[in-house]
Image (tube, rainbow, N blue to C red):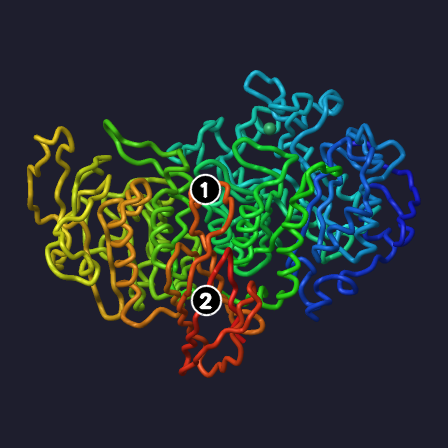
Amino acid sequence: MRELTRREFLTISGVSVITVASSNMRASENIAALPTPQSRGAAAKTGDTQKPWYAVMRRCGQINFNERDPIAMDVNAWADYWASLKVDAVLINGGGIVAFYPTQLPYHHRSEFLGSRDMFGEMAAALEKRKLHVVARMDCNYAYEEALKARPEWFERNRDGSPRKHNESTWLLKTCMFSPYFTEQMPAIYREINARYPVAAFFTNGWPSTGALSVCYCESCQKVYRETVGGTPPEETDAANPIYRKYYEVFMGRVLEVWKLWDSVAKEKRPDSVYVGNLGGGLRTVKNVKKLGEVAGWFNADHQGRAGDTVIWDCAQQGRVAQSVMKGRTITNVTGAYSNSRLTWRHTAKAPAETTMWMAQTTASGMVPWFHWLGGSPEDTRWREVGRSFFNWLAANEAHFRNKRSIADVAVLYPQNTIAFYKSGSGPGSWRGGDRAQTSDYLQGLYYALLEGRFVFDFVHQEDAAPELLKKYRALLIPNAAYLSDKQCEQIRDYAGSGGSVFATFETSRYNEWGGKRSDFALADLFGVSITGEAIGPLGNSYMRIEQRHPVVNAFDGTDLLPGPENRLPIRVSDSSPLTLSLVPYYPAFPPEMVFPRTPRTDEPAAVFKQKGASRIAYFAGDVDRTFWRSGNTDLSQLIQNVVRWVMGDGSPSVSVTGEGVAELFAWETEPGYALHILNYTNPNMTRGFLRRFYAIGPQKVQFDTAAKKKITNVRALRTGRDLAFKQRDRTVRFEVPTVVDYEVIALT
Ligand SMILES: [Zn+2]
């Protein structure tokens, strides 16, 4: 790479004169002092000078420049807009694919329309003037033909050696993360920007993501395959293949290496700067989010909206996945103000109700909203007020969004390995893994039942299920975590051994973390059952027969039969627990003449319920969670809710909200006290976007347990802006929320 030896002096309006030095010199040695974030940013506002600015950020915005924007971009108007949203930081395009400043670096393509402008510099100065942190939004994923000719080793290759073109903008070519583009060119660009501009963080669009691994055939990758992986990896996710498993480790290792390198480059100028990668994926992740969370100072979820039949709570789920690995450290979630859906329209606004509910889920789940528009000269400006009104409401109530910890008393195991790698079933009609929409269906079904039952819960990542972390929860719910390591099974057993309760389904613990099949459940002793054969299904028209009274089935008056799961494992009970739900095997559903049970009664349990001291164990041999998700069957939802209530024990839950409507709840201990978040999903567009309007739900009766001896003096509904009457007796505060239109946050102080 050509070294820059030329020195130049730039004047940045309103800031100071700084020196740009050679790219191989530590920029920090050459930069005159810039204003520190403590003197101007969010950290100063809270008086918390220990944490870097991004750790206390509450709101951010992004204007995504296009190459033509330098012709007409009004930087002051944009800076005024962002300032009017009271954001802490704004993301603006620095470079990578296109440089929006007069870069001196070779093969760093300047915007064709840049002319004599320095648009990044102008915008950075305009934001700086308004005391907003500037985050350089980069793109490391593509470069131009000119770079390909000069530095062919930077680019991804197909099997035949051809470079990989962008599918729409075919003049752009995909760069390879194993190549020096990531370790030399991108750091050189960061250093150039860091040296010239008052940048507080760097963000890369589209990298690394949480999705499936890519397989490239460039020289760097071939060398990695030869020397480290031991062969060329398969192009599809296949944890059964030892080469894939090795590649997964090597791939994750490279992602973390690049992340750490870029973070260290970002910090060369100021230690409170940070590199933030692009993650997201909602429930459906392949890359190890636990490991990504360990290197991330700030986790950005690029989960901008939903499409098609995606459920409205998709954004809250993103928050839960990210919280399971960040544990209160900064997570941002992007809301696309443009119409990102299937199809996507980049330059018209999304329905305001949809945009608002997405931002509401972001804040309810403890994430920081990041409001995003694309293109500097919008002809549709309807989105502006949608963001402004929500952000101004947030700013007015900011203290109540500073969470200290979740006060959920139920944990849901986030079964990442099963979601990423699960393959199950054999023979006709079996489903195969690799379809991530299906592997998350178990969790999705449990989730939907938890919403219907108004439970307050957290996700716990399967690699983070140590008993000391689980002990705050009354119960651990495990939606078919088929792929669990020996250690994780040991931790779950220890949790139950110390009095915790567990509800697990189907193939939970049948395989190790990579899908190696065990001869029996690793948790056979905990469940009190053993496997006697291969999974049966998918088959409809099977049943569960209620054999005797038990809290999980008492509410089912008027029936002895409940709908059965679509797939099940044949099991044998290893200790003598009474038969509560027995299996009625499949029989034909058509034609009506043939519809009668061939084996009306069996003594094989469909589920097992055990109690030992405070610990309650419920195990279902079938995929009741996934079957509920696929069928929408109300009995299955009720059954799952009953089981969750039973495993939680006899005491009342720490938070309960009763009333009409489908609502999602989050409860936090905050800096000033407590906050209960209620998201109203009651809407004909709950499972198919976009929301057109909101349908208010009526009175919600709340019972909320505080810490012992905490005296509550005020209960206020922040969205409607009024105080609520309440009663406190010992730890329990009772009040009624008269209505929830879209979202309500009740602050208890
Ligand atoms: Zn490569």
Q: Which residue is mark 1?
A: 284
Identified at 92% across, 47% down, the residue is 11
Q: Is residue 428 above or below residue 714?
A: above
Q: Quadrant of residue 638?
A: bottom left
Does residue 307 appear left or right of residue 574 in this picture? right
Q: Quadrant of ligand 1?
A: top right
Circle number at residue 674? none
Could you tell whether 499 is left or right of 436 in the image?
left
- Label annotation for residue 738: 2
Quadrant where the image shows the C terminus? bottom right
In what element is the residue under mark 1?
A: loop
Q: Residues within 10 Å of mark 2 (few under 14, many from 20)?
A: few
At a point 62% along the width and 45% down the height, the residue shown is 277
Question: Closer to the camera: disc 1 or disc 2?
Answer: 2
Which amino acid type is shown beneath numbered disc 1? Arg
At a point 10% along the width and 55% down the height, the residue shown is 547
* Quadrant housing residue 257: top right
Q: Which of 477/222 is in front?
A: 477
Q: Is 480 placed above or below 51 here?
A: above
Q: Position of residue 44 (x, y in %)?
A: 73, 67
Q: CA distance from mark 1 to mark 2?
A: 36 Å
Query: Which secondary structure lies at badge 2?
Result: loop
Horizontal side of residue 707 vs 187, given as left or right: left
Provide residue 270's location: percent of width, then percent of height. 76, 56
- In the image shown, does 167 or 500 lie closer to the viewer? 167
Label 2 is placed on what type of residue? Pro
Q: Position of residue 280 (x, y in %)?
A: 54, 44
Q: Quadrant of the N terminus?
A: top right
Q: Earlier in the sequence, mark 1 or mark 2?
A: 1
Q: Residues within 10 Å of mark 1 (few under 14, many from 20)?
A: many
Instruction: Answer above or below: position of 686 versus 526.
Output: above
Left of 594 or right of it: where is 306? right
